[in-house]
Amino acid sequence: MGAGEGGSGSEEAGQQGVNPCVGADSYHLRKPEAEALRSAFAAEMQRLYAIAEAG
């Protein structure tokens, strides 16, 4: 019954079917964590770009 359709948190998503809004809500619940990951990723990309520029 809808196994694997919802991906992460599929039990919650299964109640309303596969709805993009459910995924968006799940993202907003973890927004501080996502922001921290985005910031860390941006810093790492800057570091790698600097290494590449240095040759």
Image: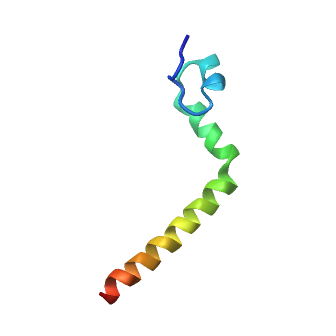
Please, which residue is most extreme toward the top here? 1
Image coordinates for residue 4, horizontal then vertical, percent: 51, 23
Number of labelled discs?
Answer: 0
**Residue 3 vs residue 29, the one in the foreground:** 3
With 46 as the anchor, is 38 left or right in this view? right
For this orientation, the residue located farthest to the left is 55
Tell me the residue at 51%/65% (across/down). 41
Q: Quadrant of the N terminus?
A: top right
Q: Position of residue 34 (x, y in %)?
A: 61, 55
Quadrant assignment, res 15: top right
Position of 6 relative to 42 (above/below) = above
Q: Position of residue 19 (x, y in %)?
A: 54, 26
Q: Residue at point 53% right, 30% down? A: 7
As displayed, is residue 1 above or below residue 47? above
Tell me, what colour scheme is on the image?
Answer: rainbow
Q: Quadrant of residue 32?
A: bottom right
Question: Which residue occupies 58% across, 67% down?
Answer: 39
On the rendered image, what quadrant is the C terminus found in? bottom left
Return the x and y of residue 52 as percentages of the image width and height: 33, 81
Against 14, is 36 above or below?
below
Residue plotted at (57% across, 67% down):
40
